[in-house]
Amino acid sequence: MRGTIYSGINNIYDVRYEDDSNHECRIKGKILKDDLDSYNPLAPGDRVEFEASDSGKGLITSRLPRRNRFARWNRKRESWQVIAANIDLLLAVISSKNPPFRPRFVDRVLIAAAQGDVTAAILVNKIDQGVDGWVNERIAAWERLGIRVLRSSAETAEGLGELKTLVKKKTVALFGPSGVGKSTLLNRLIPGLELATDEISPKYDRGRHVTNFGRLLDAPWGGKLIDTPGVREILVRGIDPEELPHWFPEFEDVMTECSFRPCSHRHEPECGVIKAVEEGRIHPDRYENYLRIRDEIEDNIHW
Ligand SMILES: Nc1nc2c(ncn2[C@@H]2O[C@H](COP(=O)(O)OP(=O)(O)OP(=O)(O)O)[C@@H](O)[C@H]2O)c(=O)[nH]1
Ligand SMILES: [Mg+2]
Ligand SMILES: [Zn+2]
């Protein structure tokens, strides 16, 4: 039998069969541990082969090939954690003010999505709390790269119509820091859904990590949505430092003007990237983020 993973906690997976029946499954043997670069063998959205039993429990015997996956590097485990598989879109969700707007976090999510062959869009939520000029400027820089950016408020419902249209008939995962409103948005989109949500901590200006496991949800209009736990950080791994510039699409054109090859675009004279930053063709904060990520991956070169 073939089914879809809806969620998994402590190695027990909620598998949904074609007839909408639910099966509480464990993994049979180590069959899924082969050729894995992640510590979790299955994530919401995965398709599996399983053997059902009369008691509603079952055994997963294999994972079907993935079309794509979105994964994040887990610093403690030094391994990838697959967040969602076989998705049409990853929505990087961020808030405009509280928790603070974190564009550099989003840039990293865009890289991680591209690494897993996943299309990404950005959702700036909580716009009822205000959107500063620099936030709009950063949004415009993403839009110039051809990335879709939506603005929404789960509080006033502004932008929810557009969001609904975007996710229609698709499998879409929401990913971002804790407290930005991922679960609240899903509760707003899917009538009757009551995912747990909580206020952000006033002392630290960040969420309390309310959602603690990823979960696939059926939308009444035919699509599927995935709620995921908020994360504090997202690291860039699996990319050689010299290759990093290629993950910044706006560098691609201007890199041809660099005099040095290879050019790190840090301090070399006659660097096309530095020139483009000075002339305002590359957003300075994207460039700053490039420098930091480059330092970070060079410090981790041993892996
Ligand atoms: N003002 C305002 N508050 C919002 C909005 N969306 C969500 N919130 C509030 O933000 C808080 C955090 O929302 P959650 O939905 O729990 O956030 P989350 O992203 O799911 O957080 P984790 O599950 O911890 O990752 C709650 O108090 C929500 O009511 C919004 O658009 N505007
Ligand atoms: Mg949540
Ligand atoms: Zn250069």
Image (cartoon, helix red, strand yellow):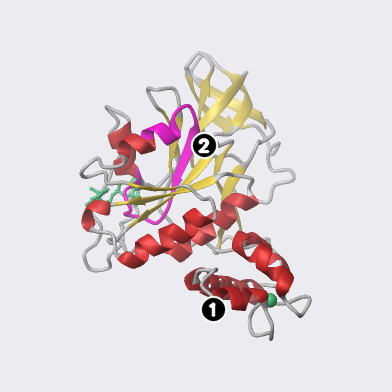
Locate the N terminus by quadrant: top right
Q: Is residue 108 above or below residue 294?
A: above
Disc number placed over residue 44 in the picture, else none = 2
Which tag, 1 or 2, sits closer to the chain's start? Answer: 2
Q: Report the label total.
A: 2
What residue appears at the point 75 percent right and 80 percent down from the top-left corner?
259
The answer to whether residue 302 is left or right of residue 219 is right
The answer to whether residue 158 is left or right of residue 75 is left
What residue appears at the point 47 percent right and 17 percent down from the top-left corner?
20
Q: Secondary structure at mark 2?
A: loop
Q: Which residues are magenta?
A: 164-182
From the top left corner, tell me how far across and down residue 100 is, in percent. Answer: 32, 64
What residue appears at the point 54 percent right and 69 percent down from the top-left corner?
282
Q: Residues within 10 Å of mark 1 (few under 14, many from 20)?
A: few
Q: Which residue is mark 1?
A: 278
Q: Please indicate, yes or no, whether residue 120 appears anywhere in the rendered image.
A: yes
Disc number placed over residue 13 in the picture, else none = none
Residue 181 is covered by the magenta coloring: yes
Q: Is residue 60 above or below residue 283?
A: above
